[in-house]
Image (cartoon, rainbow, N blue to C red):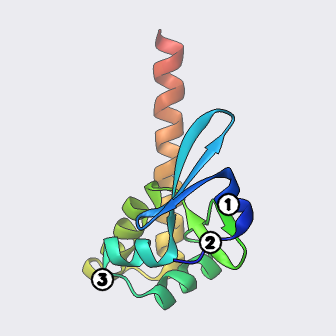
Amino acid sequence: MKTDRSVASRGTTRATGARLVLYGKTVERVTLEVLAERTGVHPHRIRDYVEYGLLEPSEQAGEQPLFAPSAVTRLRRIERLRLQLGVNLTGIAIILDMRERLIRLQREIERRER
């Protein structure tokens, strides 16, 4: 696995992705290849999702996008909506946005109830 020197200097790289230390906390990052392996989605399709805005790399290591581990779950959700439910990419974007809004609102309600 290739890594950019700036990423390697901030942490260590492993076969599962990159491990970064930011503000004293260890943060895992997943490479495009690892994301593809964990989800069974071809790297080109993942790049298409990134280009469309459905997935966002958390940072770049040179030319290599690095993703938060939560991207695995998000990518699986995208694929389920696309393949099993027949939702197009625009619909997927709307569904995921609404889901995130609902989660934020639920958290806000819970915070205010305390």
Q: Position of residue 92 (x, y in %)?
A: 47, 72
Residue positioned most to the top = 114
**Of the pair 39 and 2, the residue shown nearer to us:** 2
Point out which mark residue 51 bears.
none
Q: Which residue is mark 3?
A: 83
Q: Position of residue 46 (x, y in %)?
A: 49, 81
Question: Where is mark 2, residue-wise?
Answer: 3
- Crowd class of label 3 (few under 14; some 14 to 19; many from 20; radius 10 Å): few
Q: Could you give the CA–CA distance between mark 3 and mark 2, rounded to whole angstroms?
A: 33 Å
Residue 3 relative to residue 94: left or right: right
Residue 59 in percent (x, y) is at 67, 62
Point out the frontmost of discs 3 and 2.
Answer: 2
Q: Quadrant of residue 37?
A: bottom left
Which residue sits at x=31%, y=80%? 40
| Tag 3–tag 2 contact (CB < 8 Å) | no
At 53% from the left and 69% from the top, the residue drawn is 93
First in residue order: circle 3 vs circle 1? 1
Marks 2 & 1, CB-CB < 8 Å contact: yes
Q: Which amino acid type is marked by label 2? A: Thr
Helix, strand or loop for disc 3: helix
Name the element at disc 2.
loop
Q: Nearer the viewer, residue 24 or 56?
A: 24
Query: Disc 1 marks which residue?
Result: 7
Q: Amino acid at mark 1?
A: Val
In the figure, is residue 89 to the left or right of 66?
left
Q: Nearer the viewer, residue 77 or 73?
A: 73
